[in-house]
Image (cartoon, rainbow, N blue to C red):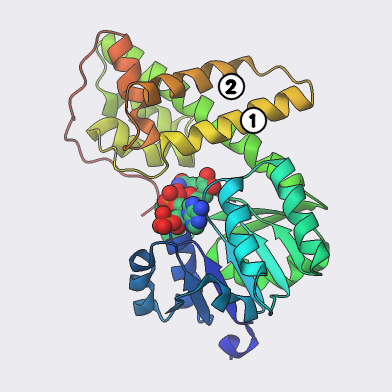
Amino acid sequence: MRTRKLPPVGWIGAGRMGFEMAARLAKGGADVLVWNRTREKAAPLQKHGAKVADQLTDLASREIVFCMVSTWKDVKEVVQKLLASNEKPKLLIECSSISLEGSAELRQLLDAKKIQYLAAPVSGNAKVIKAGKLSFVCSGPKKAYERARPLLNLIGINSSYVGEGELSRIVKICHNVFLGVVTQSLAEITVLAQKAGVPRHAFLDFLNQSVMGSTFSRYKTPAFVNLDFKVTFTPHLLRKDMDLGLDAGRRFEVPMPLAAATRDLIQSMIGQGWTEQDFATLLLQQAEASGLKLKPENVEVGDGLS
Ligand SMILES: NC(=O)c1ccc[n+]([C@@H]2O[C@H](COP(=O)([O-])OP(=O)(O)OC[C@H]3O[C@@H](n4cnc5c(N)ncnc54)[C@H](OP(=O)(O)O)[C@@H]3O)[C@@H](O)[C@H]2O)c1
């Protein structure tokens, strides 16, 4: 029954996030046509019932098109290619983490073609998506949000509508500045506790049960304890978001001393060539700066997700 009511969907971008989001949509019964620049990355989505397009323009006839790529430059590039088609979707839902200015420029591009636009960045990594716990923050016309909502509900656990225009972009930027600062702070206190003699798993066990523990501190615990830094989010993407935060701080004249210091600590990680692992390698950098050589503790710890 539900499948018949869902509109046909086009999906741009099958990276770490886009892949899992499209998979949930397809598994939920939506008719999804996916395009990814590197086609083979999208191919496994076929086992969930999605179709894979050869051309980006094949998605233009879909009623709703999602976009999940990297930066504003990339969003602009794919949307311009999509708009080169004779057909056009009715609604574009853009989920990448981009600037307020980029989002406003995108709205102008789409308005000119009479395509509705919902800015819908997300909170959560690929594992969070798989666990069904992704959340969206949305802005744009309320009607666009209502139209998108059944699909957003299939992908994640929550969507918050925060108002017109690009407001969701500033919410997401604030969220990721917090992510960077909290991760650096967690690295500092974990290294401090360890250097004073407390094993990381014991320290984090206490922290996670305390009022300061969070979904985030719990799901980063396995990485911190056992030093598994398989990428969930790259240092480059986090630096992009810290820069977006500092740009917004300048624009609105808000001092952000903690964000500025954290941004530079991420920069030093990138400068050292630590770019291919998860951004949680901030822990390793902090340990190095403290004269501590970390080893995996090889203790089984939960991530609070499964
Ligand atoms: N990872 C997280 O935890 C997380 C959480 C929340 C939000 N985000 C945001 O979500 C977005 C995606 O992140 P991700 O971790 O999924 O990144 P990712 O794994 O690097 O995937 C990026 C995707 O964008 C595509 N892409 C990039 N530039 C392109 C271009 N110029 N033309 C066409 N396709 C292009 C890539 O295609 P190819 O496969 O061909 O490279 C890939 O599908 C980013 O804006 C990020 O800040 C990430």
- In the image, residue 80 lies at what x, y percent? 64, 61
Q: Relative to 213, is 102 on the left or the right? A: right
Please, is residue 45 above or below residue 219 in the view? below
Please, is residue 228 above or below residue 185 in the view? below
Q: Is residue 224 visible?
A: yes
User: What amino acid is labelled 1 in the image?
Assistant: Gly
Question: Where does label 2 land, which residue?
Answer: 259
Quarter where residue 130 is shown: bottom left
Which of 198/242 is in front? 242
Of the 4 image quadrants, the one containing the C terminus is bottom left
Q: Residue at x 70, y 76 (%)?
A: 88
CA–CA distance in space, label 2 to label 1: 8 Å
User: What amino acid is labelled 2 in the image?
Assistant: Ala
Please, is residue 181 above or below residue 67 in the view? above
Of the 4 image quadrants, the one containing the N terminus is bottom right
Question: Where does label 1 land, which residue?
Answer: 245
- In the image, residue 112 lies at what x, y percent? 82, 64
Q: Residue at x 58, y 21 (%)?
A: 259
Which mark, by number, is residue 45?
A: none
- In the image, residue 203 lies at what x, y percent? 33, 24
Which of 219/174 is in front? 174
Q: Relative to 170, is 155 on the left or the right? A: left
Q: Is residue 139 visible?
A: no
Determine whether label 2 and label 1 are within 8 Å by CB: yes
Q: Relative to 230, is 236 on the left or the right? A: right
**Classed neighbour count for the residue bearing mark 2: other residues with Cα under 10 Å, few (<14), some (14–19), many (≥20):** many
